[in-house]
Image (tube, helix red, strand yellow):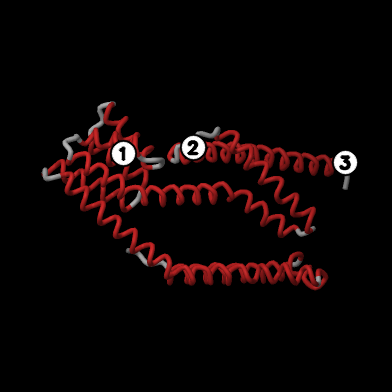
């Protein structure tokens, strides 16, 4: 290879490196913007006030530190990639778990809040005064959501739009029933206190039925978790007992393919078990 060919090769390599660097920087900026915007909206919906930028730095540190630590401890590139993916999806999983817990707590609070509203309106209070009573006397998250509803009312937003925003923000069947009851009562009239009292009793009975179903299906869910974690546990035990025999599973193409097939089968089994034990009321 003469000097001209070497120069052209060097220029091609330099161009490829620069293109990769520019693309990586653009992808990083887009990821940061998407992450911070999603985190800002998600945290605001849950009334959690944390700087999205600091949260992004924490996620980036986890994304970089987890695979490095995994590679140092295990020496496996495949497990390091798995750790990197886990670090990338950790914020979304955490947000999903926190939101589910918040929504479950709100569902438990809603029947008592509606009973409180019905009692206040039966005593002569108006709808806004009944909402203010719920905000003062109940804990978060129900008080937080109703306080947003009250603030929108004070700013002059129509009741229908405030209720529609509440329904779209929470996306819960119980809240949709509450919104529908208020909307219909405002349009056609009727005894709103009686409507709220009946709705509270209905939601309370629904919660009791869902609790019974959850108790009856908990064994199936536990079996699904045990079956799903058993291959991972056995792989760890076998790797500890005989690392030489298990090393090809994590360092060769056929080992990676085997684990990929096992992962797909485990996910399919989890989906089927979830379909069996999931019962809508």
Q: Identify residue for label 2.
A: 48
Location of residue 55 with respect to 66 vertically, above or below: above
Q: Left or right: where does residue 110 sit relative to residue 61?
A: left
Query: Which is closer to the viewer, label 2 or label 1?
Result: 1
Location of residue 247 with respect to 86 vertically, above or below: below
* Crowding near the residue tagged with mark 2, few <14, some 14–19, many ≥20 C-alpha atoms within 10 Å: few
Which residue occupies the extreme top position in the image? 155
Q: Secondary structure at mark 1?
A: helix
Q: Label 1 to label 3, Cα distance in Å? A: 82 Å
Q: Identify residue for label 3.
A: 3
> How far across and how far down the image is residue 41, in percent?
46, 38
What number of labels is visible?
3
Quarter-of-image position of residue 245: bottom right
Q: Earlier in the sequence, mark 1 or mark 3?
A: 3
**Labelled pair 2, 1 in contact (Cβ < 8 Å):** no
Q: Label 2 to label 3, Cα distance in Å? A: 62 Å
Q: Secondary structure at mark 3?
A: helix
Q: Label 2 to label 1, Cα distance in Å? A: 21 Å
Location of residue 59 with respect to 216 vertically, above or below: above
Q: Identify residue for label 1.
A: 134
Q: Earlier in the sequence, mark 2 or mark 3?
A: 3
């Amino acid at each position: 290879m003469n000097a001209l060919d070497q120069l052209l090769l060097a220029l091609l390599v330099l161009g490829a490196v620069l293109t990769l660097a520019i693309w990586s920087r653009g992808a990083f900026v887009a990821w940061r913007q998407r992450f911070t915007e999603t985190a800002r909206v998600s945290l605001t919906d849950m009334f959690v006030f944390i700087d999205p930028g600091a949260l992004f730095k924490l996620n980036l540190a986890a994304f970089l530190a987890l695979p490095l630590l995994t590679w140092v401890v295990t020496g496996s590139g495949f497990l390091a990639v798995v750790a990197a993916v886990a670090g990338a999806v950790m914020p979304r999983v955490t947000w999903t778990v926190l939101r589910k817990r918040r929504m479950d707590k709100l569902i438990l609070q809603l029947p008592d809040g509606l009973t409180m509203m019905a009692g206040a309106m039966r005593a002569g209070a108006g709808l806004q005064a009944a909402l203010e009573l719920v905000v003062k006397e109940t804990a978060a998250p129900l008080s937080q959501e109703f306080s947003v509803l009250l603030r929108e009312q004070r700013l002059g937003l129509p009741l229908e739009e405030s209720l529609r925003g509440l329904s779209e923000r929470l996306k819960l069947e119980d809240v949709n029933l509450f919104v529908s009851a208020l909307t219909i009562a405002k349009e056609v009239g009727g005894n709103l206190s009686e409507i709220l009292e009946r709705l509270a009793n209905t939601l309370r009975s629904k919660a009791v039925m869902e609790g019974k179903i959850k108790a009856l299906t908990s064994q199936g869910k536990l079996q699904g978790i045990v079956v799903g974690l058993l291959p991972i546990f056995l792989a760890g035990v076998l790797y500890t007992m005989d690392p030489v025999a298990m090393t090809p599973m994590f360092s060769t193409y056929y080992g990676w393919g085997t684990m990929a097939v096992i992962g797909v089968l485990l996910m399919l089994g989890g989906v089927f078990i979830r379909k069996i034990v999931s019962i809508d009321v």
